[in-house]
Image (cartoon, rainbow, N blue to C red):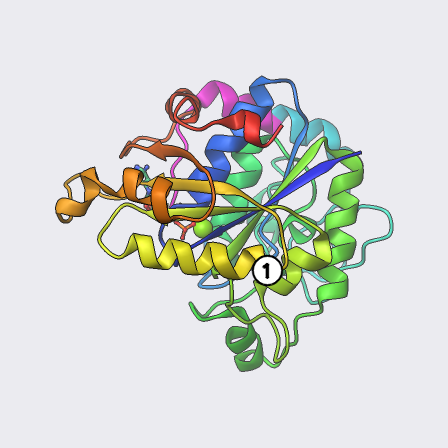
């Protein structure tokens, strides 16, 4: 049976995407077919001609392999009838729940065919690229919103509602085609998706174990213990990854946080990621050596 993992964090910007990418390359190297999912992405850039990315991935060799794979997979896929939308691929049984505005990664179709602007989901695009997951963007990220707000609020501002049933269907479709699906949340665990539901509810609906990414700064003991405590009430927490998002130590806690989390984090510390600014397949693989991947396998 396919496995899954829900990657949450103590906050936004703590390294959830980075840790997801590190796990993806490590699992790929073990021969796993890795699916990725970022169910909701907010703060998506409006792209006109080029596609700026928060995470810049550098391996040309891998990019070529990815683009070749996508070309193979997308043979015969026709652009949407509506010229305002990029072309899309579909997974049987999953219908888009909203007008598609995502950037297409269909490298066979020139961007110029699709009048800009459209929304670019950065995390989603990066994770698809690094994991080799060729599922359609609207399945990997069924909901994208422009404003950098909690999903429930961003959706409301755009007159939409997030439907967890639709996210579950997309997840099931990904799960059917991969050995493992890595699901990245947005912000922290209790960030609202709808009036009644948050990311913890989603992790429960998907029946996924949880990995908590914590930032290596002062305050992390409390933020991590709170997150682990709440998650543990309804999910299995497999562990914590402590991540350094800044080159310089922000405060003196950096050298004691790992030990403190071992003592008070309330879940196993699976690793500590050093600050590594470059993002290549090699650098991500190197970072994966700092995480106890066996906890996931
Ligand atoms: N270990 C690290 N070394 C260097 N930069 C990092 C590291 N972890 C995260 N970053 C950078 O910090 C920023 C926030 O990380 P990201 O993974 O996007 O956080 P989140 O997904 O939790 O919002 C990104 O620019 C990312 O490249
Ligand atoms: Mg992210």
Q: Secondary structure at mark 1?
A: loop
Compared with 122, 163 (above or below) is: below
The part of the image, by quadrant, that contains residue 100 is bottom right
Q: Position of residue 123 (x, y in %)?
A: 48, 48
- Estimate the x, y position of residue 258 in percent, counting from the top left: 30, 39
Q: Residue at x 39, y 46 (%)?
A: 15
The N terminus: image quadrant: top right
**Within 8 Å: ligand 1 and the Cβ of disc 1?**
no
Q: Taking 124 as reference, is 47 left or right?
A: left
Q: Is residue 5 above or below residue 145?
A: above
Question: Does 271 appear above or below 113?
Answer: above
Q: Residue 219, percent across and down?
A: 26, 57
At x 64% / y 56%, what residue is drawn?
Answer: 203
Residue 290 or 39: which is nearer the viewer?
290
In percent of width and height, residue 188 lies at: 46, 60
Q: Residue at x 33, y 58 (%)?
A: 222
Q: Which residue is mark 1?
A: 233
In this view, the residue in front, 297 or 69, is 297
Magenta span: 52-67
């Amino acid at each position: 049976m396919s496995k899954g993992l829900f990657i949450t964090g103590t906050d936004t910007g703590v390294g959830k995407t980075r840790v997801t990418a590190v796990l993806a390359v490590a699992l790929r190297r073990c021969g796993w077919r890795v699916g990725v999912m970022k169910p909701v992405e907010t703060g998506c850039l409006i792209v006109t001609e080029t596609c700026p990315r928060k995470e810049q991935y550098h391996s040309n060799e891998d990019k070529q392999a990815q683009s070749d794979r996508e070309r193979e997979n997308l043979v015969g896929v026709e652009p949407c009838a509506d010229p305002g939308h990029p072309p899309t691929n579909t997974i049987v049984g999953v219908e888009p729940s909203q007008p598609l505005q995502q950037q297409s990664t269909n490298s066979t179709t020139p961007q110029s065919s699709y009048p800009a602007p459209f929304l670019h989901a950065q995390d989603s695009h990066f994770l698809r690229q690094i994991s080799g997951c060729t599922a359609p963007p609207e399945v990997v990220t069924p909901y994208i919103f422009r404003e950098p707000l909690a999903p429930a609020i961003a959706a409301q501002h755009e007159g939409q509602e997030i439907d967890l049933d639709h996210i579950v269907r997309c997840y099931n479709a990904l799960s059917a085609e991969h050995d493992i699906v890595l699901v990245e949340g947005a912000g922290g665990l209790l960030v609202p998706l709808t009036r009644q539901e948050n990311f913890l509810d989603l992790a429960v609906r998907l029946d996924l174990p949880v990995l908590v990414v914590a930032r290596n700064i002062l305050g992390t003991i409390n933020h991590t213990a709170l997150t682990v405590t709440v998650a543990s009430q309804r999910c299995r927490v497999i562990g914590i990854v402590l991540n350094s998002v800044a080159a310089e130590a922000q405060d003196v806690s950096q050298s004691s946080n790992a030990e403190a989390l071992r003592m008070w984090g309330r879940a196993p510390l699976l690793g500590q990621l050093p600050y590594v600014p470059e993002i290549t397949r090699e650098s991500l693989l190197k970072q994966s050596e700092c995480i106890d991947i066996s906890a996931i396998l």
